[in-house]
Image (cartoon, helix red, strand yellow):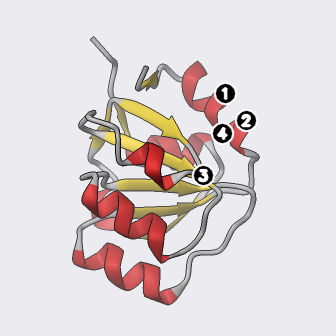
Amino acid sequence: MASSIKIKKIAELLDACVVCGEQYIDCEVNHAFASDLMSDVLTLESEQLVLITGLTNMQTVRTAEMADINCVVFVRGKKITPDMIEVAEENNMVLIECQYSMFRTIGVLYEAGVSPVY
């Protein structure tokens, strides 16, 4: 069984900024998946998942919406656009900006007990 972690703890561990969905930061996630290939994200069947990506565009938020992912961490200092925030707010998503590399982000979350999807 995967251990869960609150989204606000993820933001704290990553020294990250919650840009959108602050009202949902007490929600928990059980798994993490890192990818810049949104086609890979669409193959996932995990619930309570955080997506870690450096792909900052509308496709990412739309893919998260289709995959029922409610938390996306954007790494490498990528900036979230107003259009992305609008769609995320409509879908009760948390969007987080993180300065860390994808590798470091994954390592921090793994060390904190977040399980990989597979």
Whole-angstrom CA distance, mark 4 to mark 3, is 14 Å
- Rendered location of residue 47, percent (x, y): 24, 37
Whole-angstrom CA distance, mark 1 to mark 4, is 5 Å
Q: What residue is at 65 percent from the left and 50 percent from the top?
A: 15
Q: Disc 1 vs disc 4: Cβ atoms closer than 8 Å?
A: yes
Q: Quadrant of the N terminus?
A: top left
Type of amino acid at the residue the image marks with label 4: Thr
Say which residue label 3 marks. 36
Outermost residue on the top side: it is: 1
Left or right, residue 117 beside residue 107: left
Whole-angstrom CA distance, mark 4 to mark 2, is 6 Å
- Rendered location of residue 23, percent (x, y): 28, 65
Q: Disc 2 vs disc 1: Cβ atoms closer than 8 Å?
A: yes
Between residue 67 and residue 105, name the one nearer to us. 67
Camera sees residue 21: no
Camera-near label (4 vs 2) is 2
Say which residue label 2 marks. 103
Q: Disc 3 vs disc 2: Cβ atoms closer than 8 Å?
A: no
Camera-near label (2 vs 1) is 2
Q: Which mark is residue 107?
A: 1
Whole-angstrom CA distance, mark 3 to mark 1, is 17 Å
Q: Secondary structure at mark 2?
A: helix
Q: What residue is at 42 percent from the left and 46 percent from the top?
A: 41
Camera sees residue 67: yes
Say which residue label 4 marks. 105
- Rendered location of residue 16, percent (x, y): 61, 56
Q: Disc 4 vs disc 2: Cβ atoms closer than 8 Å?
A: yes
